[in-house]
Amino acid sequence: MDKMKKKLNIENHIIEIAADVFEEKGFAGARMQQIADQAKINKSLLHYYFRSKEKLFEKSFIIIANRIFAKLGQAFNFSGSISEKITNFLENSQYILWKNRNFLILFINELNQNEELLKKLMDEINMSQELNIFLSQLKEEQEKGILRNDVEPIVLLVNIISLSVFPYVGKPIISQIVEQLNYDYEDYLEIHKKQIAQFIINSIKNPDYKD
């Protein structure tokens, strides 16, 4: 095996191990020593291949993103109502965002500046089948009168994404607002996690519908 191939094999092995640790612990909770131990290499060698935890996370992210979106796709791919699917999706997404909340702003900035990383991410992720099933069911529930007829699918999806992500990426703004109202930012996020699904569901339910 030539040196270049061996180096790539070691790098790929480290990235796979790191993805497992980042997924389990989140960015803030992951430790380079733990990654080195699980990869069965010493920490100095880990830093030789990846200068920092940020660089290693960036390399691992495509793997992590695929796993995340596979899990989120599963949230839509089960026999439940639109309300149940929204709740399931948000419980999964908020758990993931919560674990990586201390890295999220840095990562969003990286995506904005790194078009190649963003393109690779979008090429890897395809949830069109799950989303089409969701949108078809949304229309059915509107026709049955369960949901309001004026709910636009694209607006609903963007609202779900926005309400999920903004409290984390908008931390500098949100933290200032909640502090003025005598809340701690971390406490606010806990409340947000618990109430976001019901907030969205209440906004789309037809108040005149009777079971």
Image (cartoon, rainbow, N blue to C red):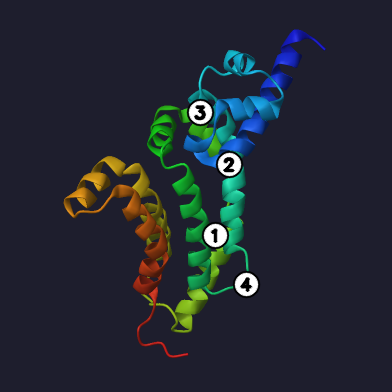
Marks 1, 2: nearer the viewer? 2
The Cα–Cα distance between marks 3 and 2, rounded to whole angstroms, is 22 Å
**Pointer 1 with pointer 3, Cβ within 8 A:** no
Q: Which residue is mark 2?
A: 23
Q: Which mark is residue 79?
A: 4
Name the element at disc 2: helix
Q: Three-letter amino acid code at disc 2?
A: Glu
**Residue 165 position (above or below residue 120):** below
Q: Which mark is residue 140?
A: none
**Image spot of residue 157 (x, y percent):** 43, 59
Q: Residue furthest right?
A: 1
Identity of the residue drawn at 67% across and 21% down: 11
Q: Are marks 4 and 1 in contact (CB under 8 Å)?
A: no
Is disc 3 placed on a helix, strand or loop? helix
> Quick check: 143 above or below 168?
below
- Residue closer to the observer: 144 or 192: 192
Residue under pointer 3: 116
Q: Nearer the viewer, mark 4 or mark 1?
A: 4
First reached walking from the N terminus: tag 1 or tag 3: 3
Identify residue type, mark 1.
Leu
